């Protein structure tokens, strides 16, 4: 289960027209043994949602760890190897199988005779991205329109990677100023052949973006850059309370034919909650009603439903559920319990009378036996319906 949810609008139209595949990448922290992905249509879509393949890879603990993954996720915007003009760099050159695309800008490319070791490098880019670099043929500023596409007004994570291609130049002359849209990003960056990485975890951008690399006043070497990554920093939208998720998963296991969309987070995204589920709002998201009336359900009622302690209403009428009714006395907020027109058997739990807010209890037309508990007779404000069962004493009018 992903610790929180985030969404991204995916547009495959342009790639489809060019005969190219579309791929999207995100970085997030998972704090459980399972993860869920929801692919859904939006108001811009004219076709059914689809996905061709899905890959999940474990990244090293040191990668992108300056991000507060308890409240944010990263969605890849662009990742380029600026001095590379071949095919996409990926596994095995990048052991995390990230895609480093060649950059198509019309700029000066130089080859390197020295690639730095990357084992201790920030975010561990593949050494292949340091085999070539963008530079200028004169001692002047280098300007890049990067990323190539215009950006939505949002917060971004930006990482840039550098390594000079020769050990013969004194380190004192390898100094850069870096501006993004004419705002200082990094000043007096000293780069040696061992390489350097600079990053910003929260940088506000909108529209076209320009990266400017300028030699400082006492530098006598042209600036260069090897690679860069930029991610959209997306806030996590919360998640359904773990207690409720586990309770519903156990409830689902006892059903022979659960609703087809009962996968992933029960409440999120908000527009795609599980069938029959309504949820609370705010940071602590709870399941507050369960309505699966006339769904043709087969199976039994798991005792785990008693762990959905925020429930105010349960509607399971007109199905084919069987077995005993579990103890639901822990549902202190429950006002409505409708189990009519099923095949429940056994006794009515006397503990139902302990639910102070209960005002509707529909149990008619089942196979219940025994006696109607005294705790339910004459309970103030309770609409109790029990006809059509096999009780030893007559049902109350």
Image (tube, rainbow, N blue to C red):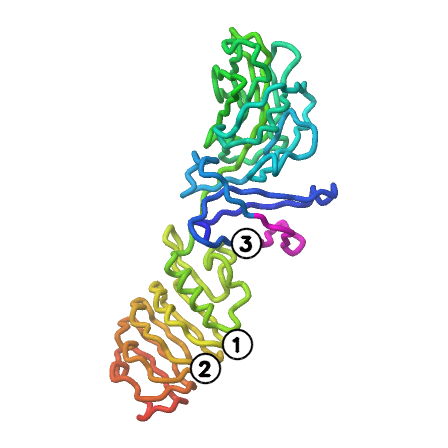
Q: Residues within 10 Å of mark 3 (few under 14, many from 20)?
A: some
Residue at image mark 3: 38
The earlier-in-sequence mark between 2 and 3 is: 3
Under circle 2, the secondary element is loop
Q: Residue at x 32, y 68 (%)?
A: 331
Q: Mark 1 sits on what residue?
A: 296
**Residue 85 spot, x, y in % from top left:** 69, 28
**Visible in this render: residue 397?**
no
Location of the C terminus by quadrant is bottom left
Residue at 44% x, 36% y is: 65
Res 389 visible: yes
- Residue 313 shows which numbered tag? none
The percent position of residue 133, horizontal first and vertical second, equals: 62, 21
Looking at the image, is 294 positioned above or below residue 57? below
Question: Residues at badges 1 and 3 in contact (C-beta under 8 Å)?
Answer: no
In the rendered view, tell whether residue 314 sits above or below residue 223.
below
Q: Nearer the viewer, residue 42 or 118?
A: 118
Q: Which residues are magenta?
A: 37-55
Residue at figure coordinates x 52%, y 47% from the top left: 7
Residue at 44% in and 62% down: 278
For disc 2, the neighbor class at 10 Å (few under 14, some 14 to 19, many from 20) is many
Q: Position of residue 197 (x, y in %)?
A: 50, 25
96 sits to left or right of 283: right
In magenta segment, residue 45: yes
* Dominant SS type (magenta): loop
Name above or below for residue 222 compared with residue 103: above
> Mark 2 sits on what residue?
342
């Amino acid at each position: 289960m992903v610790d929180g949810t985030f969404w991204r609008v995916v547009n495959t139209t342009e790639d489809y027209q060019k005969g190219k595949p579309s791929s999207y990448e995100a970085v997030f922290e998972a704090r459980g043994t399972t993860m869920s992905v929801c692919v859904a249509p939006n108001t811009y879509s004219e076709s059914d949602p689809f996905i061709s393949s899905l890959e999940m890879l474990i990244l090293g603990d040191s990668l992108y760890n300056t991000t507060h993954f308890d409240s944010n996720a990263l969605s890849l915007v662009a990742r380029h190897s600026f001095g590379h003009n071949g095919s996409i760099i990926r596994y095995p050159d990048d052991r995390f199988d990230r895609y480093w695309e060649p950059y198509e800008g019309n700029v000066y490319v130089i080859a390197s005779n020295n690639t730095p070791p990357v084992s201790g490098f920030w975010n561990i880019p593949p050494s292949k991205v340091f085999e070539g670099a963008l530079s200028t043929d004169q001692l002047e500023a280098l300007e890049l329109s990067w990323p190539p596409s215009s950006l939505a007004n949002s917060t971004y994570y930006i990482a840039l990677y550098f390594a000079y291609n020769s050990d013969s130049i004194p380190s004192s002359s390898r100094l850069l100023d870096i501006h993004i849209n004419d705002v200082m990003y990094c000043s007096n960056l000293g780069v040696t052949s061992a390489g350097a990485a600079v990053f910003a975890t929260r940088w506000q951008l909108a529209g076209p973006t320009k990266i400017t690399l300028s030699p400082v006043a006492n530098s006598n070497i042209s600036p260069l850059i090897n690679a860069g990554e930029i991610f959209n920093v997306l806030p996590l939208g919360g998640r359904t309370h773990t207690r409720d998720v586990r309770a519903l998963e156990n409830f689902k296991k006892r059903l022979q034919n659960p609703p087809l969309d009962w996968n992933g987070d029960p409440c999120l995204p908000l527009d795609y909650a599980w069938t029959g589920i309504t949820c609370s709002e705010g940071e602590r998201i709870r399941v507050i009603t369960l309505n699966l009336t006339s769904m043709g359900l087969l199976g039994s009622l798991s005792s785990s439903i008693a762990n959905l302690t925020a429930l105010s209403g349960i509607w399971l009428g007109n199905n084919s559920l069987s077995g005993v009714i579990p103890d639901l006395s822990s549902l202190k907020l429950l006002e409505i319990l409708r189990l009519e027109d099923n095949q429940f058997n056994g006794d009515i739990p006397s503990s139902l009378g302990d639910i102070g807010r209960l005002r509707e209890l529909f149990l008619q037309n089942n196979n219940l036996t025994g006696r109607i508990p005294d705790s339910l007779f004459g309970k103030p404000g309770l609409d109790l319906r029990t006809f059509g069962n096999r009780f030893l004493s007559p049902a109350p009018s």
